[in-house]
Image (spheres, coloured by chain):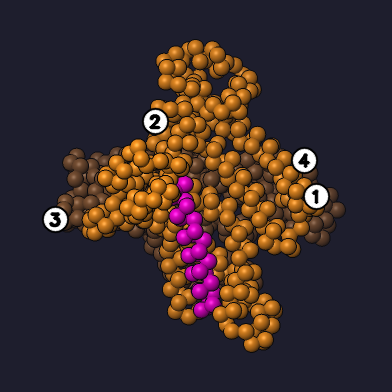
Chain colours: A brown, B orange
Amino acid sequence: MSDWKFMARQLVKNPLSLAGIIIISIFVIIAIFAPLIAPPPEGHLDHYMIPRDGYSATPKLPSEEHIFGTTEGQYDIFYGVIWGTRSAFRVGLVVIGIVLVTGILLGSLAGYFGGIIDEVIMRITDIFLAFPALILAMAIVAALGPSLRSVMIALTVVSWPSYARLIRGDILQVREEDYIEASRGIGASNFRVIMRHALPNAIYPTLVMASLDIGAVVLTAAALSFLGLGAPEGYADWGQLTSFARNWIVGPSSDPLRYWFAVTIPGLFILFFVLGWNLLGDAFRDILDPRLARR
Amino acid sequence: MELRSYIIRRLLFLIPVLFGVTIFIFGITMLFSPIERASLYVTDARQMTNIPQLIETYGLDQPFWVQYGNWISEVFSGNLGWSRVVGMPVGDAIWAFLPATLELSIFATPIIILMGIFLGTKAAAHKDRPLDHGTRVMAIFGWSLPTFWLGLILMMVFYGYFTGLLPPSRLSIPMELVVNSASFIRYTHINTIDAILNLKGAVFLDALRHLILPVITLSVTQVAFIMRLMRSSMLESLGKGYILTARAKGLSERVVVNKHARRNALIPVITVAGYVFAGMVNGVVITETIFTYKGLGWWAWQSAVRLDIASVLGFALFNSVLFVLVNLVVDILYTRVDPRVRLGGVMQ
């Protein structure tokens, strides 16, 4: 556990990672308290659907009633970005969770048993890794029909191979250690050796990697939503909110930047969410890689 | 092992991967009904009206392997299906949209590589000084930027505020007329290159002006990626013994950084060329979509949104073949650049 303490101290000491921690904490607070920050109107059934104030296309400037204004179709931007935080965490956590389970399962099978099992699993990862991620994700979403669920499935399909490979490599390293040999010698089953001895010693870098990949997953999900391949219309989602502004980037000639709020605000949320995870990720990598930590 | 036998072995190794890729892609099509899948086999518009005939001919109600066999033999004879979005065969569509995308990449690639390497070297050489902090913060912001949002912001500023400075689309209308006139020979369909070959300076400048915003949008994330990698790689190589030797010999700092350290630091950058390629393909889809720049990415987006499955899968297949080949070239380059890499070694 002193590892964790050491790590925590390192993280707080570095201004960049501290900024990352603060940013992520703010987003966690926003997500938890979304119903208080942006209370859904009375009788609003699905809280993830952004309430509309009329149906006119033209965005309305920020006002007392709508602090960030409304975007195309009179969707309230403030409500959208606050509840969008929840959607972002949900996509990130669900995808990373499933990817971890799949990756750990297949990666440890491949690394521990080697031979034909390893060969088969690794050749399958080769196939999945032969596509640029967004292209494969687009194809899968198009095939399943656009929805948030399809986006999550697509992101899982494109991300698990890297994790399986990472775990496999780490398991390969610990497989020859004496303690593995010893527990096998006293007759422990393969399952027990993997679960009790191999994985706990190999899984750490993967877990850190995974927790920090949440930002990247959310970024790709936002891109898919922006392209019109994600959440249904009106769902609180940063990517979709950004795409609503596509017709309003240029205002009337007297005031060309009139609709700046509709264009910038949802994107700023994405930027800072991803930035927070990347700042943390950099710090973790420096701490975990002792060659770099000394510099 | 010799380079030639290494290349041959790697090429043979591609066969099972590409076989797997085609099975995977075909597996995706099985999510659709035979009627929807029929477009995978169509070669001209008239055939689209006679779907039951297609189902019969290509055995779309047969078992998976029979259908796969039929499909793959069609693919090998160059038939990738019918693109509903543009109303032409998928193969022709790829060919038609490729020049526009190539034009983007021709400008973006050198910017990404040179800017990334230059900024990374500078940051490492000024480690922990303001220049380093500045570039690092820029890089981490650039790396976290949603590409589509960056594009919208650029458009907001340059289409709205500085109206007419950097206009949308690929060419302005007068230049479009010049390009489509009989005297202008389309050698490559890449506007800038054709303009040079036809000695039309005005067309070249106009095309360039239209390219600036998309190229910036496409490059920023990748520049940040290379810069970050280059910085840490430079730091590693600056700590090596031969740098100490070079400094001890009394070489100027510039020579030490640019010759001794940088050359060795470039090796890890070459190994990620495959990632950069994948990143650019992803970026092209988003960039072309927001700028309505009609290239491969725009076409892929249109197809995906309109659930034109033959085009989306044709595009995915095309990209995976390209991606696998790029990775092969990168691995071969790697063995050339770094003589320490043994060719016969592990293939992971």
The residue segment tinted magenta is B102-127
Q: State whether discs 2 and 3 lie on one chain.
A: no
x and y percentages locating residue A33 in the rendered image: 35, 56
Please indicate whether residue B338 sits to the left or right of residue B59 in the image.
right
Chain ID for label 4? A
Q: Judge depth for marks 1 and 3 and give the one in front.
A: 3
Label 3 and label 4: CA atoms lie apart by 69 Å
Going by the numbered disc 3, the residue's amino acid type is: Ser
Q: State whether discs 3 and 4 lie on one chain.
A: yes
Above or below, A128 against A198 in this view is above
Label 2 and label 4: CA atoms lie apart by 45 Å
Tell me what residue is drawn at x 50 percent, y 26 percent. B81
Q: Of the numbered discs in the image, which one, if any, rests on residue A254?
A: 3
Q: Is residue B270 magenta?
A: no
Q: Judge depth for marks 2 and 3 and give the one in front.
A: 2
- Determine whether label 2 and label 4 are within 8 Å by CB: no
Residue B342 appearing in the image: yes
- Determine whether label 3 and label 4 are within 8 Å by CB: no
Label 1 and label 3: CA atoms lie apart by 78 Å
Chain ID for label 3? A
Q: Judge depth for marks 2 and 4 and give the one in front.
A: 2
Q: Which residue is mark 4?
A: A116
Going by the numbered disc 1, the residue's amino acid type is: Ala
Mark 3 Cα-neighbour bin, 10 Å: few <14, some 14–19, many ≥20: few
Tell me what residue is drawn at x 63 percent, y 19 percent. B66
Q: Judge depth for marks 3 and 4 and give the one in front.
A: 3
Q: How many marks?
A: 4
Mark 1 Cα-neighbour bin, 10 Å: few <14, some 14–19, many ≥20: some
Q: Of the numbered discs in the image, which one, if any, rests on residue A188?
A: 1
Label 1 and label 4: CA atoms lie apart by 23 Å
